[in-house]
Image (cartoon, rainbow, N blue to C red):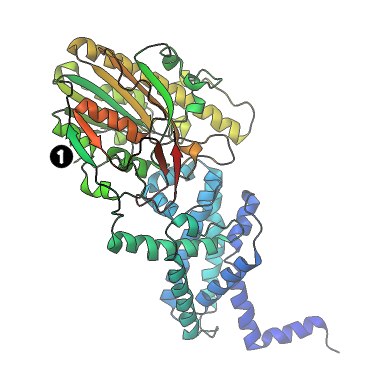
Amino acid sequence: MKSPVLNCKLLFKNGWFKQFCIVLLMVGLVVVPDLLFRIFNDGLCKYSFGNIIQALLVAGLMVLIPYKKLRWTLFFIILFFCGMELCHFAFFGVIATPYTYVWMMSELWDTIDGALHSLNLIYAPICVLLPAGLLLFLDVKFDGKIKRSKVALYILTFVFIFMVVDVNRQNRAFFYMGTNKKAPVFVNAVKKLNFILFKAVPKVLFSGYNTHFSEYKIENVAGPKRINIIYIFGESANPNFMSLYGYNRPTTPFLDGLKNDKTFYYSKGYSSSVSTVYSVMMNFYMQREPENYAVQQNKKSDILALAKQAGFKSWFIEANTTHPDYEGKVDNFINIVPVLSANNYSQGEVNVVLSKLPRPAELGDKNIIWYHQNIIHFDYAKHYNFDKKFDVFKPDDDSTKSRKVAEYSNSVLVWDDLNKNIFKYAREVAQKTGAPTYIIYQSDHGELVGQNKRGHSFLSREVATIPVFAKCYNCRENIFMGMKNPTHYRMNKKLLNLFGFELINENDDGKTFYINGKSLYGDDDFITMTD
C-alpha cells in the first residue's frame, strides 16, 4: 500500500490537479490583503460565505482570461482600488463609498501626505503589494502551463453586464456602495469601480443634472456704499475642541474674550459637505440642495462673481490646495501654498498670511479679502512647529488617540492666534477707512479627533459640525446676530445683502437644510435636517 505522501506526489504530477492548485493559489491571493491588514489594524469583520464566493469567482475568471495584457490590466486596476479601500479604512475607521475614490484622487496630495504621517496607511498598500507581487510572479512563472479559455472572458463579461444592470437600478451610491464589512475589499472594489464607470460617469456625460428645482434669482437691494469684508473659509475646524464653545482646554483665549461683545456673533453651524472639494464648490456657488447641480452650471449665485459685479476690490489669499474658480472674478489672487510647503510650514501660516494682507492705502470704497485657510488641517503638528510657544497641550498617555487630541488642540491654539492678528488688522482698517468692517468665518467641514472614526470626508452630522462667527466694526448692528443653525448657504445669503443683492430661492422653505456627501448630484447620499 502506497503512503499518503507518495499518493499526494503522484496526484500532483497529474496535469489538471497541478493546474487546479496553481489557479486556486492565485485566486486565494485576492483575499490575502484583508488577512494581512488585520494583523496590523484589527477591525474588519468576518467574511460572509456569499461574499467569499463572489471574490473567488470573479478572481478565478480573471486568472483564466487568455489575454495577458487584458488580464494584467484588470489585476492592476482592481488591486489599486483594493489599496485605496484599505487606506481609507485604516485612516478613517469606516468603509468607503464609491465617490470616496473620486475624492481620494482629487485630493491625491493630501492623501499621500496623510499616508506619510500614519503607520496604518503605510501598512495598507503593503498588504496589497505583497500578495499582488506574488500573484504576478505566479502568473509569469506558469504562463503557458495553465489552460486558459475565452469562455472565462465571456462569463466575466456577463457578470459585469449583470452588475451594470444592477447598479443602474439604484439612484444613490449610498445604496449601492458595496461597503459590506463582511466582504473582502476585492468585492467592494469591484462593485464601487462598477458604480463609477457605469453609473456616475455616464450620468455626468449624458444624463445631465436634475432639473426639477426652481432656478435661483438674484435681485438688487440697497447695500452699503463703503464697506470692508474679510471672508475666511476655514479648514477641518471642530468647535468641540474650542473653549469658545465649551471645550475644557483653553484653546481659543482670544475668541473667548469676545463672548460678551454685542457685535460678535458665534454659533455652531453645519457645512454644506463633508469634503473640502465639494464644500468649496457648494459654498462659493451657494448650492443649497444636494441634487441641484444646475447651480454649478448656470453660476448665477457665484459669490466671487457677484462681489465683482457689486464693484468690490478683491484679494484672494489661498493657503489650500483646493480652491474655487477665481479666474476673472478677483483682482488679486495670492497663492501661498508654495511658500508654506517649501519649508514644511516652518514660517507658519500666521506669518505668511499677515504679510499678504493689503495695506489700508491699497483699499477702495468697497473691499473684500477672501482667505481660504489650511491651518488645522492634518497633519496638525506642522501648524505649530514653527513656534514652540504653541506646543502647550500634552498627551494624557502614550496612545495615538491622546497624541492626536493634543496636536489638534495645539493647532486650534495657533488658529486662535491667527484670528487675533486678523481682528487687529480689521480694527485698524475700520479706524483708517471709517467704513463698516466685517470678519466672517465658517469652516469647510469639521473634523473627528480622538474617536474610532477620525478625520472627515465621510457622511456624518458630527463631521459637518463647524464653528461659525462674524464680527463687525463701525456697525450699529451685526446682521448675522440671532441666526439659528448657520450653514454655508445661510451665511452667504446674508453676505449677498452686504453686496447689495438678495437671493430668491423658491426651493428653500426656510427651515430645512442639508449636509451633502461627496457628489454635487446628491447621489453619494445626504442628510436632511430641520430647525
Q: Where residue 125 sits: x, y (%)?
A: 52, 54
Q: Is residue 384 above or below residue 214?
A: above
Residue 386 visible, this orientation: no
Q: Is residue 434 above or below residue 488?
A: above
What residue sits 32% from the left and 38% below the top?
A: 283
Image quarter of residue 531: top left
Amino acid at dot 1:
Gly
Task: Decide: few, some or many residues near mark 1? Use Cα within 10 Å; few <14, some 14-19, many ≥20.
Answer: few
- Element at badge 1? loop
Q: Where residue 260 sits: x, y (%)?
A: 42, 11
523 with respect to 326 (left or right): right
Q: Is residue 163 above or below residue 465?
A: below
145 with respect to 80 (left or right): right
**Quarter that holds the N terminus:** bottom right
- Find disc 1 in the rendering and name its residue: 328
Q: Where residue 233 sits: x, y (%)?
A: 33, 31
